[in-house]
């Protein structure tokens, strides 16, 4: 019989995953219906509310890592999570159902994500990341949020001037008559459940990993990164099943921007974050390369088919093999 420790660790991991799936579904429902209520595209809601909610685990873990004296995990968490968000979070749902991203207008937000990535990489070369790096990143976050706010206002003005089209296709899973209190419940359950589920899963996973002798750096880049990306994965899977490609793609792009600008920005105010030379020579460039893989879906209007999903997932598996072998 296994001792209580391993049993507890596996139980926490499974319970955390279950909570993540339910919370992801609730957050998608709340975000889509909130967009209808506000007259804002679901994409913009995903870039802000959903992205912040699914990035909450990264924030909690990064701050906890710095306070516990293992700040390297904070950087590995964010860099690894951003790579996982592109390759794993978009790859796995595409294996379940083709995501029709060809209908999504994400060029502006995608370019903002690339800018955030380049800015973050540039600041890493002035390591360690301290409070002044954080202020620059938070300034970038305010610019991104301001752009989303202006886009939302412009969309509402355009909708107000349009003649309603009865033939417009209804959004699956959306309920225009859903009362505000129910929307609020969905959002609260999603935003509260995601970090709770992630915390349970991460604690259990790290304890399991340590029994196999994995280093803190490898844990940050792999298990912690995957664990904190599970909210995005849960949300994106449910969005793909509900045929909400704009929520799925917007969630990933928004989460990556929040990870770089908000998570590291806030965490660096708590304490300095060292940058291992390995990040400067490999992991940061893998993150940027993964982001550039979205160009066909953003600019060429390609759908993320099952074939693309298999390719993205395979690339992430190869990345994990390299990290674990190094």
Image (tube, rainbow, N blue to C red):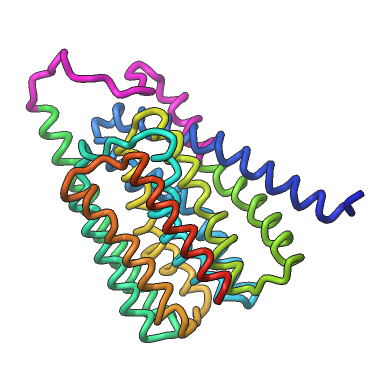
**Number of on-image labels:** 0
Query: Along the line of sight, which residue is nearer the eye, 261 or 276?
Result: 276
Relative to 165, does residue 295 appear above or below in the rendering? below
Q: Quadrant of the C terminus?
A: bottom right
Find the magenta span and give its range: 161-190
Q: Residue at 59% of width from left, 50% of height from top? A: 198
Q: Main secondary structure of the magenta part?
A: loop
Q: Residue 233 placed where, x, y %?
A: 47, 45
Q: Residue at 18% of width from left, 43% of height from top? A: 301
Relative to 179, does residue 156 appear above or below in the rendering? below
Q: Residue 93 placed where, x, y %?
A: 43, 40
Is residue 164 magenta-colored? Answer: yes
Relative to 191, does residue 58 appear above or below in the rendering? below
Q: Residue 140 placed where, x, y %?
A: 28, 66
Query: Along the line of sight, which residue is nearer the eye, 179 or 56?
Result: 56
Is 9 on the left-hand or right-hand side of 306?
A: right
Q: Residue at 38% of width from left, 65% of height from top? A: 260
Is residue 140 magenta-colored? Answer: no
Q: Residue 71 placed where, x, y %?
A: 56, 76
Q: Quadrant of residue 220?
A: bottom right
């Amino acid at each position: 019989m296994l001792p209580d420790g391993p049993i507890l660790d596996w139980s926490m991991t499974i319970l955390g995953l279950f909570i993540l799936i339910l919370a992801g579904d609730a957050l998608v429902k709340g975000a889509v219906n909130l967009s209808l209520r506000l007259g804002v595209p679901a994409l913009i809601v995903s870039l802000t509310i959903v992205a912040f909610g699914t990035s909450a685990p990264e924030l909690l873990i990064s701050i906890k890592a710095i306070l516990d004296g293992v700040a390297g995990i904070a950087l590995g968490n964010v860099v690894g999570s951003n790579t996982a968000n592109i390759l794993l979070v978009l790859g796995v749902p595409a294996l379940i159902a083709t995501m029709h991203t060809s209908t999504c207008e994400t060029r502006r937000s995608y370019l903002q994500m690339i800018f955030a990535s380049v800015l973050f990489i540039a600041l890493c070369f002035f390591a360690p990341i301290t409070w002044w790096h954080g202020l620059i990143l938070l300034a970038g976050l305010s610019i991104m949020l301001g752009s989303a706010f202006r886009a939302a206002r412009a969309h509402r003005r355009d909708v107000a001037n349009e003649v309603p089209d009865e033939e417009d296709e209804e959004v699956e899973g959306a309920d225009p008559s859903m009362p505000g209190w129910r929307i609020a419940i969905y959002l609260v359950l999603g935003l509260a459940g995601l970090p709770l589920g992630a915390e349970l899963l991460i604690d259990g996973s790290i304890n399991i990993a340590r029994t196999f002798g994995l280093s803190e750096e490898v844990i940050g880049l792999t298990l912690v990164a995957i664990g904190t990306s599970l909210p995005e994965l849960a949300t994106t899977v449910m969005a793909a099943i509900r045929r909400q490609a704009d929520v799925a793609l917007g969630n990933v792009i928004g989460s990556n921007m929040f990870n770089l600008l908000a998570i590291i920005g806030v965490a660096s105010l708590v304490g300095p974050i060292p940058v291992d030379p390995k990040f400067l020579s490999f992991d940061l460039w893998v993150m940027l390369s993964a982001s550039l893989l979205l160009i066909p879906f953003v600019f060429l209007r390609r759908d993320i088919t099952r074939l693309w999903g298999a390719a993205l997932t395979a690339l992430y598996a190869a990345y994990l093999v390299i990290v674990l072998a190094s």
